Amino acid sequence: MSDFERKVAERMKRNEQSPGVDPSPSNPARSKPRPVDNEQKGRSLYQRLKQAGKIRNK
C-alpha cells in the first residue's frame, strides 16, 4: 500500500467515526434573532383587531 493510499484509508476511517463536520473557520457565527417583546406584540395585535372592528368593548 502506498503512502497516499494509507492516508486516504486513515481519513476514510476517521470520517466514519465523526458525527459531522466542523464549520469552516472563515464563516462567521450565525447572528442571533432580535429578542421579541411579547407584551408589545400582543398590544399591537389587539389594536389592529379593534380598529378592524373584530373586537367590541362591552
Image (spheres, helix red, strand yellow):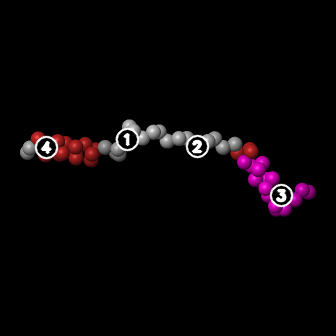
Q: Is residue 36 left or right of residue 53?
A: left
Give the residue at mark 3: 51
- The kind of residue on which mark 2 rests is Pro
The tag earlier along the polypeptide, 3 or 1, is: 1
**Residue linked to disc 4:** 4
Disc 3 residue type (three-letter): Gln
Q: Which disc is residue 8 wearing?
A: none
Does the magenta segment cover residue 1?
no
Which residue is pictured at 45% across the width and 39% down the height?
28
Secondary structure found at label 4: helix
- Indicate which disc, 2 or 3, sits on the residue closer to the N terminus: 2
Residue found 35% across the figure and 44% down from its top: 21
Residue where numbered disc 1 is placed: 24
Q: Residue at x 76, y 53 (%)?
A: 45
* The C terminus - image quarter: bottom right
Instruction: Please provide percent x and percent y for residue 48.
Output: 79, 56
Of 14 and 48, the residue lying toward us? 48
Residues in magenta, as a range = 41-58
Furthest residue toward left? 1
